[in-house]
Image (cartoon, rainbow, N blue to C red):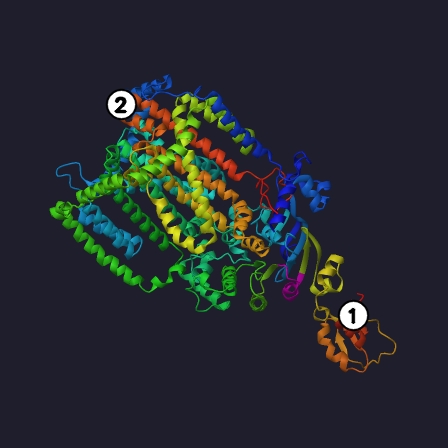
Amino acid sequence: MSATLVDLEETPDTQAAPVRAPRRRLSRKTVLLLSAGAIWLAGYFLLRGTGTLTLPTAELTDLHRSLNHFNAWVASNRADNPVFLYVFSPLRSAVDAVANVFTTTFAASPTGLRLPEIGWLGTVGLLSWIAFAVGNARVAVLTAAVFVFFGLQGLFVEAAYTFSLVVTAVLLSLLVGLPLGVLAGISARIEKIITPVLDFMQILPTFVYLAPLALVFLIGPASAVIATVIYAAPPIIRLTAHGIRGIPENTREASDSLGTTGLQRLFTLQIPMAKRTIVMGINQGTMAALSMVTIAALIAAPGLGQVVVRALQSLDVGTAVNAGLSIVLMAIMLDRVTTAASERAKPATQRRRSKVSRRLRVIVLGATFVLVLVLVQLSRTVLWAAQFPTDLNFGPAITSGVASASDWMQTHLFLLTETFREAVTVAFLNPFQSLATETPFFIIFAVLALAAYAFGGWKLTALVLGCLTAIVYLGLWGDAMVTLASTLVATVIVMVLGVLFGVAMGRSSRLDKLLRPVLDAGQTLPAFVYLVPFLGLFGATRFTAIIAGVIYAAPAAIKIMADGISGVSPTVVEAAVSSGSTPWQVITKVQLPMARKSLGLAANQGLIYVLAMVVVGALVGAGGLGYDVVAGFVQSSLFGKGMAAGLTIVFLGILLDRITQAAAFARPSKSTHKAQPVPNNSVPNTKEA
Amino acid sequence: MNSSAISVRNLWKVFGSGGAKIPLDPELSALPSSNLLERTGCVAAVRNMSFDVARGEVFVIMGLSGSGKSTLIRCLTRLIEPTSGSVSIGGQDILQARPAELRDLRRQKMSMVFQHFGLLPHRTVLDNVAYGLQIRGTAKNERYARSREVIDLVGLNGYEGHYPEQLSGGMQQRVGLARALAGDPDAILFDEPFSALDPLIRRDMQAEVIRLHKDMGKTMVFVTHDLSEALKLGDRILIMRHGEAVQCGTGDELVGSPANDYIADFVSEVPRSDVLTLKWIAEPLAAGTPGDAPVLSSSTIIRDAIHTVMHSSSPVLVEEAGAITGQIDRDSILSVLRGVRAAA
């Protein structure tokens, strides 16, 4: 079998010059990539330290200064510029008003004792009831437990703020996302316009939205909500469109053949059948919203995020863990409740058994609602039901416990963690970083251009060169290279994990069943809480950010690989096994080559996730672009630089995304005409007896 | 031709960009499919098709996969937009119909049964059947009453509250059939409705269609790739290949006088004695045949004549429209049963 495979691999290659080395001929792509590597190394050793374009931390370029001026201009003209007067400010007030409704209901009113409209007891009751109504009794109990636990952590008000902002943002995202999703689902033309925009929004790290939004809408809850809507609406739009588009052709045809009008089709067919997918979109949107609302703490969004950010900045691991735990719990709760809601949205047949208790359910809902009203009323009149009792606050205990545990680990496991950290840093990170930062910029231009040409031809090369030029123009080349180095190192680790676990999961459905829930849970957590435990272990270094990035990105990469491997047709695997391949041969000669597209996709997603995390990692001491962005939030004299850093991240993201996408979707060779069901011919140099 | 229910003239469907020009171009339209694809990148799924379906007739369109039969039946109700030609239903050219008129036509005049049923998974059987009525705005009570009647008719009594997923394939297709019948259309189009069912169920469903046709006398256009199904159901059969009509006729015409080798090959497996009538094997009257020999009608199926011929000592006379037109003897019957191709 493997012998035939090799033979088949050789055949399509015949377009290059024949004869010479008949056995191992390198494809043009390989040659290009190898020479790119050679140029990089040569450039590094010969020209090291020249043309590195580094900009010292405190210095600014003219561009940064003019951005500062722009910032100042906006600040002084906000009151009378018509664009602000008639567009941005009303929008801001409207969003603020909606957010206020929820924050004053659940978190705190701006006046008097700062008690919310509904105290903690009422909140717990009402939200559990809602969880029961949209989901089931189990998630209702979970909701109650989680909110009570917030209280015990001493973070009830912060959690209520975060929750209120998430609810506001999700509602507004639905308002924007559902109609757009429906339109994109119905009209191919609208989808064509929307998809690239959504793709673009998805590759932007959460972080970079914040500065421009703060510039336009000022810092505070309104900007936070707007940023969150921008981040949370895409999955809602995408899944709504997908659900509507995914209706089987024959069902649609059948309804057309009965003479439905467009609207009738929408309401009797498309929306009911897409309901489940739409609710899944709401689930994803909600998780995205939580992630963004916590990060928006950087532009003064109230809530748990602020507690974490402040703790990270003062390296207070205990407090960070306490608040991080609340964020994780909130994520789990929101995920469970929205998932239960999507279960409920399944077609009636798949949850038949509840049919008997339907009446009972209505009765229970009615009865419990009365109870909820009582609780709400109680929480509006009695102080202990309005404000979570302070003598039940175990927050300080948790904080100090974690802090001492972290201290203990840092002193006693110092040898272990420090050795690990230093080993990776010295052996891997430092050389790579110096390779990226100390090579002249024009060499890196050449290297990336060659790589782009190898994967995607002239068009991609032009795009890559455009991005690189923009980065140089923005004046932060050096910082960009620092970020790039960390990102690439982390991505390599992610890919190693992705292939190892992905292959194992793809080959064993039991392992898949075991790990998948863990990975799913890992993907729902907000970026930022990943920093917390590693800060406790490794202290504030870029290494912490890289490890957090790896852990953040690995689930996505592993899942894509596992799906790719298990998606290889079982007949092909059977054929390979029946011709006597060893498991190793099956993996390396059949499964991995056939899952090559997944490999590229995993690298693509891994890079995007890692980049987002490495940038956020600035909060725990990673340098590079993330640091510039954070500094821009804090110091107005660095505003321009932060803005430029945000843009640089965008260009870096586009560049990495496009190259890896091209690598993932590159066809083996140009001879696509004869449909050849051979895996591919780009498994170079596989020696085989 | 107002007496025909459906009348198709010079119908073309060409897939691919620039396909609209091909039917008009005498040179291109004459090209065989493979050359056409090479020259223009277009695929002609239906080529210059013309036929009439009489009121109350069961008209079968048959062909192998890729012959264009499913495209053709979709052109009849414009689920696929034809490239050129005309389709008139009850005298109205539907290719000229505006969207609202077309919708009306689909609601009132013709309904369709699909290979993969096309049921709505989120609706019960009753609501699926009532769907077409709901679409045209029938009041709730009325449409449920009517749907219950139709559900009764197709033998799904007691399943009104079930969801499609809970039913077997055969029962799902009964729902599809009921949905098509609910609106009381003039014509029903069937697109390979039983291909996805297993053989026994398929036989039941074919019997069901025959029964319904007998009871209600609706015009039916039936697409299938199964020749025995075509012969069983069809008053007339149109055989398609590469988008073109190869032959159109009754079952015994196709078996008895195939237009070309393709058809001959196609029908070669058919047990001829079950399809052909005496007309096809009658020989000229011989001088020695006694006048008092048994007489059979020329439209008798051969199989039904076996008994008489075998028990008669002399050849049997064949009569058509009151006159004796020929005779048959044991040899001619036996040669048919043996499968020797009779020279028609």
Q: Secondary structure at mark 2?
A: loop
Residue B2: horizontal and vertical position, in percent?
63, 55
Q: Secondary structure at mark 1?
A: loop
Residue A534: horizontal and vertical position, in percent?
31, 39
Q: Is residue A321 magenta?
A: no
The chain identifier of the residue carrying mark 1 reads B
- Decide if residue A24 is on the left or right side of residue A207: right
Q: Residue at position x 58%, y 59% from top?
A: B190
Please identify the quadrant where the C terminus of chain B is shown. Answer: bottom right
- Decide if residue A313 is on the left or right side of residue A190: left
Q: Is residue A499 above or below residue B121?
A: above
- The disc label shown at residue B281, or none: 1
- The disc label shown at residue A79, or none: 2
Residue B123: horizontal and vertical position, in percent?
42, 58
Q: Is residue A207 visible?
A: yes
Q: Is residue B246 above or below residue B206?
A: above
Q: Is residue A261 visible?
A: no
- Distance from label 1 to label 2 (Cα)? 101 Å
The kind of residue tagged 1 is Ile
Q: Residue at position x 73%, y 73% from top?
A: B302
Between marks 1 and 2 in the image, the one whose residue lies nearer the viewer: 2
Question: Which residues are the magenta region?
Answer: B224-236
Q: Residue at position x 43%, y 32% from top?
A: A653
Camera-nearest residue between B83 and A98: A98
Rate crowding at label 1 as few (under 14), some (14 to 19) or many (20 or more) other CA atoms within 10 Å.
many
